[in-house]
């Protein structure tokens, strides 16, 4: 079956829905391409990305439509008509056929673009525009359209002036709602594909730019524009995205995170220096970028710059370093240590991304350690306790000898046990552990534990397993 | 005029990492500091190798002590394999050594190249007093070491390379240490530190104890007579006399 036909085929009398054999019989020279819904969806996504050059509010109207909210954006292109002309010319250059309509509501735009009334329609002309169009143009369910057709209502004009109450009673609320939306009597929000950035600055270039240095210069210039807007509202950027529009329609998005609200253009530029350096594939400019946009995806309140008050300088330098490293290596690789409220040693201290905000908890930890006179903790902790083979042991005491990583260690000194209960409230809490600090003959100091207690042992059950969890200096 | 030129020449001739000034970081143990000429040179690269795989924690103790003495922001860069094999630095344990975990940033890198890049970036940051680069086996590029030394010289930060085993590469590090665990009978953390290369003076070896209360190293020579450990020097070819 044919799912779509191009202009030439349409003129020859072919239409979507026709069986392929029939179409072939009519025109043996027909050129057929198998349908690929995924590729279509991908192409639509690409075009949607590319349409971000006109407005940040782009929504997909699957499977083959896009909705652009150009309120307040059109003047950048010299008016709505000029914008539509620019859009259609660029799409045509990319080899895409399109039908573009500008109208005062989503419904009217949809109807005009898909039912043969493409072009520019001023606000307030919705009624005139819609009246001659078929009812399906109102985005109604096929069943509703069919039942309306049965009583002779075929065009939008047929129902525009009908009394509302009987219409609703007979055909459901959908008809009136969609009609009101199309007539712009009821507001219909557009759900953009991508979250809309609170701060955006963009620049178009008369001549495409291609060099990385130029891109960075542009990023800094845009950051300078953003800085004013950010300062006015007392915000700083936590996540910034640089969108580059290539002349051939490809769109490149590069995002960078920061460890604190940021406004300084030089620092924003420095972030992108690292991001560009870390790109796995080079910043392929093709024939160049003809537009760039810098958007702040996440903004946070940021105190006004304090000047001349000491103390903060080092922290600031450190934040800058963290940002640079995170931009290059990824935020997950740069971490800081925090203390958490848990008695399980592997949870008591954790490494979180250094850019994440939050308290570190070490003051509380130190107070707690003093309070309970916590036994010494190892300097290095294994991510996963490593099982050891104990050669000789006494119940509730440390092993006399054990084998770890194929080497035999003879215990000459042991300290313990320190009992740490498992997380008994949780299903995966595990058994209680008895920790021992042991030293072997060569002076190596291990942090061993026995998972499970002998007293809990079922008669004839397996002896509790031993693990090495960390190493002391 | 000639004198001026001579002075300039002297300034140029001085190898990096050996500048004068308040650059030495005393370890606390008088005997060691005397040999080091006041302490570990700041603004220079030092290499600390564990005597073997199992002694990495001991070497970590030595490094942690030095970082605690430097008492500023510390950046700890480790290759992914290092954390897997030897365990990750553990906050509560570091805290006991005087390394405030809130002033420590850890960075995990996949490649040696990234390790060196992060170290250099961190050394160039003025807030950082101590950069620890933890690597597994394998040689260290002499050019990279030199770059790190220069970066350290610029800001006066300490660059410490922590290796899982003694390297056999010719290094331009200011000092090289081989650290192994020492028997302590449950006392303070204690390590055997062998100074195998010292650009400023003699070599030596000491049993060092980290004193938690004073926050410094002390010599534990009194603890017991130190029998010389077997000279395990895989990084140096064995000299053989020809019969």
Image (cartoon, coloured by chain):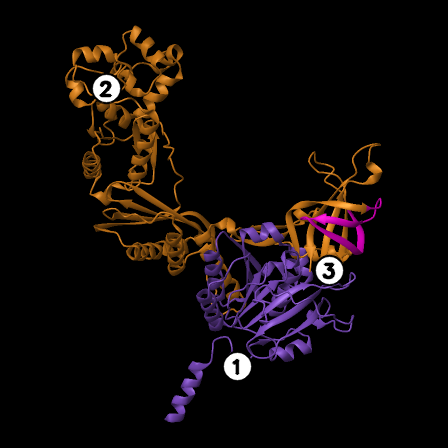
Asked if A290 appears above or below A22 in the picture, the reply is below
Left/right of residue B66 with respect to residue A85 in the rendered view: right
Left or right? Give the position of A286 relative to A269. Answer: left
Q: In what quadrant of the picture does the C terminus of chain A appear? A: bottom right
Name the residue that disc number 3 marks. A442
Q: Label 2, label 3: how many angstroms apart (C-alpha)?
A: 94 Å
Image spot of residue B42 (x, y percent) = 55, 73
What color does chain A have in the rendering?
orange
Mark 1 secondary-structure assignment:
loop
Which residue does the image show at 60% across and 80% down from the upper left? B37
Whether residue A404 appears in magenta in the rendering, the answer is yes
- Cα distance between the residues tagged 1 and 3: 39 Å
A79, above or below B90, in the image: above
Which chain is the one coloured purple? Answer: B
Which residue corresponds to mark 1? B20
The circle drawn on residue A131 is: 2
Q: CA distance from mark 1 to mark 2?
A: 90 Å
Task: Residue at the far front: name it.
Answer: B243
């Amino acid at each position: 079956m044919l799912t779509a036909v191009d202009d030439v085929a349409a003129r020859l009398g072919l239409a979507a829905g026709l069986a392929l054999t029939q179409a072939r019989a009519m025109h043996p020279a027909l050129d057929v391409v198998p349908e690929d819904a995924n590729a279509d969806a991908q192409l639509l996504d690409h075009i949607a990305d590319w349409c971000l050059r006109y407005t940040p509010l782009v929504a997909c109207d699957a499977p083959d439509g896009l909705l652009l909210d150009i309120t307040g954006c059109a003047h950048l292109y010299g008016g709505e008509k000029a914008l539509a002309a620019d859009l259609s010319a660029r799409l045509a250059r990319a080899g895409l056929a399109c039908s573009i309509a500008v109208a005062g509501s989503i419904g009217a735009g949809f109807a005009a673009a898909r039912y043969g009334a493409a072009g520019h329609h001023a606000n307030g002309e919705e009624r005139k525009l819609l009246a001659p169009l078929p009812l399906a143009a109102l985005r109604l369910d096929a069943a509703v359209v069919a039942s309306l057709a049965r009583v002779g209502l075929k065009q939008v004009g047929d129902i525009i002036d009908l009394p509302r109450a009987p219409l609703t009673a007979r055909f459901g609320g959908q008809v009136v709602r969609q009609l009101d939306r199309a007539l712009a009597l009821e507001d219909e929000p557009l759900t953009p594909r991508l979250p809309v950035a609170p701060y955006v600055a963009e620049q178009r270039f008369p001549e495409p730019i291609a060099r990385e240095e130029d891109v960075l210069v542009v990023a800094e210039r845009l950051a300078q524009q953003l800085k004013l807007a950010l300062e006015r509202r007392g915000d700083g950027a936590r996540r910034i995205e640089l969108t580059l529009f290539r002349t051939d329609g490809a769109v490149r998005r590069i995002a960078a995170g920061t460890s604190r609200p940021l406004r300084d253009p030089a620092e924003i530029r420095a972030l992108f220096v690292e991001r560009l350096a870390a790109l796995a594939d080079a910043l392929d400019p093709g024939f160049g970028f003809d537009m760039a946009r810098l958007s702040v995806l996440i903004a946070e309140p940021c105190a006004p710059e304090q000047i001349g008050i000491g103390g903060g300088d080092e922290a600031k330098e450190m934040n800058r370093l963290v940002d640079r490293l995170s931009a290059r290596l990824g935020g997950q690789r740069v971490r800081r240590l925090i203390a958490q409220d848990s008695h399980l040693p592997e949870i008591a201290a954790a490494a979180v991304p250094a850019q994440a905000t939050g308290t570190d908890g070490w003051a509380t930890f130190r107070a707690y350690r003093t309070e309970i006179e916590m036994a010494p903790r190892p300097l290095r902790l294994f991510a996963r306790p490593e099982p050891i083979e104990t050669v000789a042991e006494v119940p509730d005491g440390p092993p006399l000898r054990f084998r770890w990583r194929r080497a035999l260690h003879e215990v000459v000194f042991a300290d313990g046990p320190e009992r740490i209960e498992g997380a008994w409230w949780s299903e995966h809490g595990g058994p209680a552990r008895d920790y021992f600090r042991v030293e072997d003959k060569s002076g190596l100091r291990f942090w061993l534990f026995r998972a499970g207690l002998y007293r809990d042992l079922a008669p004839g059950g397996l002896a509790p397993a031993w693990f090495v969890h960390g190493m002391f200096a | 005029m000639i004198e001026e030129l001579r002075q300039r020449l002297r300034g140029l001739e001085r190898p990096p990492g050996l500048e004068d000034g308040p650059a030495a970081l005393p370890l606390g143990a008088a005997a060691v500091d005397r040999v080091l000429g006041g302490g570990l040179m700041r603004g220079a690269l030092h290499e600390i190798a564990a005597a073997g795989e199992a002694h990495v924690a001991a070497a970590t103790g030595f490094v942690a002590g030095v970082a605690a003495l430097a008492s500023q922001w510390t950046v700890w860069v480790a290759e992914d394999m290092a954390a897997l094999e030897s365990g990750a630095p553990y906050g509560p344990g570091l805290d006991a050594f005087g390394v405030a975990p809130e002033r420590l940033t850890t960075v995990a890198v996949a490649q040696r190249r990234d390790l060196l890049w992060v170290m250099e970036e961190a050394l160039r940051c003025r807030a950082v007093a101590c950069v620890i680069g933890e690597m597994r086996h394998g040689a260290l590029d002499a050019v990279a070491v030199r770059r790190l030394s220069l970066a350290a010289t610029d800001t006066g930060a300490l660059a410490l390379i922590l290796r899982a085993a003694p390297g056999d590469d010719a290094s331009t590090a200011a000092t090289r240490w081989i650290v192994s665990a020492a028997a302590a009978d449950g006392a303070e953390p204690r390590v055997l530190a062998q100074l195998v290369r010292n650009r400023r003076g003699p070599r030596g070896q000491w049993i060092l104890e980290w004193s938690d209360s004073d926050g410094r190293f002390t010599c534990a020579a009194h603890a017991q007579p130190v029998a010389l450990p077997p000279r395990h020097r895989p990084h140096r070819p064995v000299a053989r006399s020809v019969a």
